[in-house]
Image (cartoon, grey):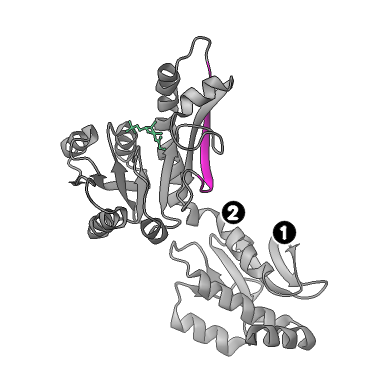
């Protein structure tokens, strides 16, 4: 799988960015840093990035409207062909337009155990509250400040006599450990079988009258108390593939699909003769709309006529 291309946004020191740059030097790291951009041309992190031969972009946001400045950033990030935007001490609110464009593909690190202490002065607030643990969180960026789904957290013990600075210094060590791991896990999530199963589950369970149960040890989805219409196949019958098995209309359709795309489709051992087709989920480029379509089609083949009809009517609305 190609490495995920990461644009990092900074405003100052850039030590989290540096930690990501060093992590990316490991040959098995699944991401590479392809751009470091700052909203302050004097940000110290820019010189570090340049020394590491990473393309940089810097422009002051002063005197510009938020959306206007963010549009310039967006253009630079797209020119660099980034897959993800990673905020590393980027201390400027982003416009809803920008956040919307990078939804699900933008991460941030925050120096608190979210949902505690969103915003600024996190360490002061943790100490004032008498917390015995502080820490950091990596989360997806949504329109609300420091509010998106948390991907990873590391707890840091508060020590006797800690000041906001001494606590910040230890939390920063934890940040440097946490960010690259969380980013690596996130950019490779599509290769995680548990993630794939969850995607299938959400789409299968959205169909009417469906339950999840196992079939010969594999997770499967059936019409309640009746036939299976979808199976999640992982290392099944000696196969190395991770795939969704769904019903076709029969041998003709099976052959046609395999002829059409023999990377994506295959005849599953044991299930093939009864009309099932395997659709690979482990190629790193799954089209989940297409999978939803297949689940619906297979459901319609297996559902009793009455249930199928009610679904047709529902789908018309
Ligand atoms: C880090 O502690 C980061 O968590 C924090 O700014 C610092 C940047 O340091 N970010 C926020 O507070 C965002 N809400 P760095 O420039 O050395 O990475």
Q: Is residue 222 above or below residue 179?
A: below
Which residue is denoted by mark 1 in the rendering? 217
Q: CA separation, marks 1 and 2?
A: 15 Å
Return the x and y of residue 252 as percentages of the image width and height: 57, 90
The quadrant of the image that shows the C terminus is: bottom right
Whether residue 203 is visible here, answered yes or no, is yes
Kindly report which numbered mark, 1 or 2, lies closer to the viewer in this rendering.
2
Q: Are marks 1 and 2 in contact (CB under 8 Å)?
A: no
Whether residue 156 is visible here, answered yes or no, is no
The quadrant of the image that shows the N terminus is: bottom left
- Observer-nearest residue: 5 or 217? 5
State which region is magenta.
Answer: 147-158
Is residue 151 inside the magenta stretch?
yes
Which residue is denoted by mark 2 in the rendering? 194
Point 69% across, 87% down: residue: 313
Question: What is the secondary structure assignment of the residue under circle 2?
Answer: helix
Question: What is the secondary structure assignment of the residue under circle 1?
Answer: loop
Respond yes or no on whether mark 2 lies under 8 Å from ligand 1: no
Query: Which quadrant contains ligand 1?
Result: top left
- Observer-nearest residue: 94 or 265? 94
- Observer-nearest residue: 193 or 98? 98
| Category of crowding for the residue at label 2, using alpha-carbon neighbours closer than 10 angstroms: few (below 14), some (14–19), many (at least 20) | few
State the residue lying farthest toward the top. 161
């Amino acid at each position: 799988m190609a490495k995920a291309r990461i644009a990092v946004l900074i405003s100052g020191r850039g030590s989290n960015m540096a930690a990501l740059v060093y992590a990316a030097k490991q040959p098995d790291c699944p991401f590479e840093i392809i751009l470091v951009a700052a909203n302050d041309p004097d940000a110290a992190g820019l010189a570090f990035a340049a020394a590491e031969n990473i393309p940089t972009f810097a422009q002051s946001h002063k005197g510009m409207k938020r959306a206007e400045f963010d549009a310039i950033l967006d253009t630079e990030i797209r020119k660099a062909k980034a897959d993800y935007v990673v905020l590393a001490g980027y201390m400027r609110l982003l416009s809803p337009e920008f956040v919307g464009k990078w939804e699900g593909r933008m991460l941030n690190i925050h120096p608190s155990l979210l949902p505690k202490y969103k915003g600024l002065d996190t360490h002061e607030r943790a100490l004032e509250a008498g917390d015995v643990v502080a820490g950091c969180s990596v989360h997806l960026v949504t329109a609300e400040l420091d509010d998106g789904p948390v991907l990873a957290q590391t707890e840091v013990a508060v020590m006797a006599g800690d000041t906001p600075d001494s606590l910040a210094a230890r939390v920063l060590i934890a940040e440097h450990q946490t960010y690259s791991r969380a980013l690596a896990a996130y950019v490779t999530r599509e290769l995680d079988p548990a993630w794939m199963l969850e995607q299938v589950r959400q789409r299968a369970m959205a169909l009417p009258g469906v339950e999840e149960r196992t079939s010969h040890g594999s997770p499967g989805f059936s019409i309640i108390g009746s036939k299976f219409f979808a199976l999640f196949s992982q290392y099944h019958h000696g196969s190395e593939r991770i795939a969704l098995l769904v019903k076709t209309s029969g041998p003709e359709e099976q052959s046609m699909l395999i002829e059409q795309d023999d990377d994506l489709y295959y005849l599953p051992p044991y299930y093939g003769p009864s009309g099932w087709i395997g659709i690979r989920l482990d190629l790193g480029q799954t089209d989940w709309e297409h999978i939803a379509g297949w689940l619906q089609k297979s459901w319609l083949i297996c559902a009793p006529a009455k249930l199928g009809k009610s679904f047709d009517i529902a789908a018309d609305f």
